[in-house]
Image (cartoon, grey):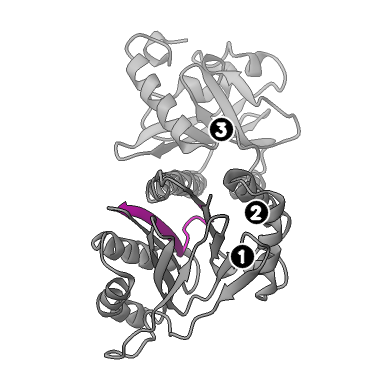
Amino acid sequence: MHQETSPTSARSAPAAVRRAALVAALDVVDSGPEERFERITRIAREAFGVSGSFLNLAGAEVLTIKSQQSDAVFGPTIPLQDTFCGRTLDQAGPVVVPDARADDRYADMPMVVEDPNVRFYAGVPLRVGDDSVKVGTLCLVDPQPRTLEPDDLALLEELGVWAERELAAGADEDRLRGVLAGLQPAPVAVPGYRIGGMSVPHGVVSGDLHEWHLAGEALHLTVSDVMGKGMSAGLLAATIRGALLARPSADPEQVVAALDEQVGPDLGRAESFATMFNGRLDTGSGRMDFVDAGHGLVLQMRADGRERTLLSSDLPIGLHPAGFARSSGSLELEPGDVLVIVSDGALELWDSTLTSLSRLGAMWREEPEIEPFLARVRARALEHDPGDDLTVVVLARD
């Protein structure tokens, strides 16, 4: 083995650390087989008629086989220096080895001198990140010596580009999840009250949002649901969140009126709308003033066992006629009372009707602690996929 291409040499150590960090950030090493990668290696093996095709990721010292199509099963990890991938990390482009036994760089490798007696190898680099760091290879192996024509090599490179995009998509989703996690409301301590919530996107991005914060002695609480799912709904929800945070101490009437004016046109142009419950709680008296813009998914549970659903008579933001005043309301949160505010994904956990709110209420009475209650809701969502973004917020007065 040539020292200048060793992945563990002193010269390549910083690159190995950088590479290993990028591979870890992709968050695919420990996730098991994924069809998005299996499809690529399956096509590669069939297209080239070889005994094996592999998608490999290179750490600092170990190579992980993320996807393999081969009669002989390898890995899932192999010492990096014992692999073609490990010995070609410093090479910029594709590597084709017509006969490994006749090539001093690879002739001593266990996979060449022992089973599966690899003779032919062809691999293209997989690169990620702004500086295009090589984190692995898409490769072909066969026990018979052979080579690749230019058209064949071009096809292998195209499959490699496909694999790179799948890896990058996963990295983008991870970054997006990190951004979304940072958009969750920060915990607040409100003497005499407990508040908590969760939002589970149907895909990567949620069109739901929930927000709470303190302004003096008042607790401001918002739950909103943008029509639709996916990236477009998530972008609109982020716009609404920004407009909310720009008015931290405004009354609900002012907040929703401003959103009608500022965000309503954007929603209209996007052929979308957003329902919203926005409330301001006087923590001393327990009085909450609110505006409900077409949301109507609020369950108030009394300490004595009674409950009621707060319905809405207003249109959502984006559909409400310009210049028309909003209706406002108020409620009293007595000691022992609980508010459960949800997006419509919560209704799909049962029968898609408002009866589902009572089911959630019954679940709360069985488990009147916020985190265990939310854990039960998540478990229900795993058993009965709502097919929509799901948000649940609980405000309880002790």
| Amino acid at pointer 1 | Ala
Q: Residues within 10 Å of mark 3 (few under 14, many from 20)?
A: some
Query: Residue 256 lies in magenta, yes or no?
Result: no
The disc placed on residue 346 is 1
| Amino acid at pointer 2 | Val
Indicate the position of residue 116 as horizontal and vertical percent values. Answer: 71, 23
The reply to whether the C-beta atoms of the residues labelled 3 and 1 are less than 8 Å apart is no
**Residue 115: which quarter of the image?**
top right
Local secondary structure at mark 3:
loop
Residue highlighted by disc 2: 377
Query: Which mark is first along the chain, 3 or 2?
Result: 3
Indicate the position of residue 318 as horizontal and vertical percent values. Answer: 36, 81
The reply to whether the C-beta atoms of the residues labelled 1 and 2 are less than 8 Å apart is yes
Seen at 55% across and 23% down, the residue is 63
Local secondary structure at mark 1:
helix
Label 3 and label 1: CA atoms lie apart by: 33 Å
| Amino acid at pointer 3 | Val
- Give the residues drawn in magenta, as a range: 197-215
